[in-house]
Image (cartoon, grey):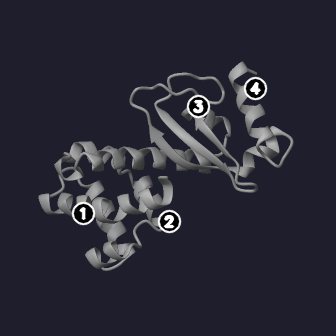
Amino acid sequence: MSYAFENLRAAVVDASEADNWSDAVGEWYVSSCEIDDDCEETCICGQENLRYLYTIRNRLNGNVLYPIGSRCIKRFENPDMDEDAEYLRRLEMLDEMGKHGIWESDWSELKPLLSRGTIEWLYSMGALEDRRCVSFSGDDDRTRELLLKTFNRRCPSYKQIKAVKAILSYCVLPWYEAEYCD
């Protein structure tokens, strides 16, 4: 085992209820993601120059470990944790884009962040249930279908892109900030 993995394992087990890695990994979930454009942070394992900084939280005792890098998230060998980390990374990128004006963003910048998986994850997490989404499209199922339909098109119409930007700006990003940003 590498020195970095030993550092991660020690930190996780120390902050867990379980006293071994195999049992401890099941106690943790990804609770947030930040982007460090300057890559100045160091993972708890010792890996330097992190761009994506994840916070993980223990569901049994509430303990928090930060910063955790992408490679260490994968070391948990938990597909749900990997999936959550990926979608939170995409949402953080959308949030950054939103701070600079999502309305000015080109579709080619938005589409890579809106995979079918991301849209389904947003739906399953309740991000499309916001009253603003429902009033916009009728209900969360229709919002989901609109997002999927637009995502599946090679060249969506101006109206479809505008609708997606509205859903992102008025529903998804406020939900994300309320749920995952401190």
Q: What residue is at 30 percent from the left and 64 percent from the top? A: 170
Is tag 3's residue or tag 4's residue first in the polypeptide sequence? 4
| Labels 4, 2: front one | 4
From the top left corner, tell me how far across and down residue 77 is, in percent: 67, 40
Q: Going by the image, does 56 lie left or right of 164?
A: right
Is tag 3's residue or tag 1's residue first in the polypeptide sequence? 3
Is tag 2's residue or tag 3's residue first in the polypeptide sequence? 3
Residue that label 1 marks? 166
Q: Are marks 3 and 1 in contact (CB under 8 Å)?
A: no
From the top left corner, tell me how far across and down residue 13 is, in percent: 79, 39
| Labels 3, 4: front one | 4
Going by the numbered disc 1, the residue's amino acid type is Ala
Residue that label 3 marks? 71
Q: Are marks 4 and 1 in contact (CB under 8 Å)?
A: no
In this view, the residue in front, 120 or 33, is 33
Q: CA distance from mark 4 to mark 2?
A: 35 Å
Residue that label 4 marks? 6
Q: CA distance from mark 3 to mark 4?
A: 13 Å
Q: Going by the image, does 182 lie left or right of 164?
A: right
Q: CA distance from mark 3 to mark 1?
A: 34 Å
Q: CA distance from mark 2 to mark 3?
A: 26 Å
Q: Is residue 74 depicted above or below 3 in this figure?
A: below
Going by the numbered disc 4, the residue's amino acid type is Glu
Residue that label 2 marks? 124
In the rendered structure, find residue 179 and report the number of the disc placed on it: none
Q: Is residue 111 visible?
A: yes
Is the N terminus in the top left, top right, bottom left or bottom right quadrant? Answer: top right
**In the rendered image, which quarter is residue 163 located in?**
bottom left
Going by the numbered disc 3, the residue's amino acid type is Arg
From the top left corner, tell me how far across and down residue 20 is, in percent: 85, 40
Q: Residues within 10 Å of mark 3 (few under 14, many from 20)?
A: some
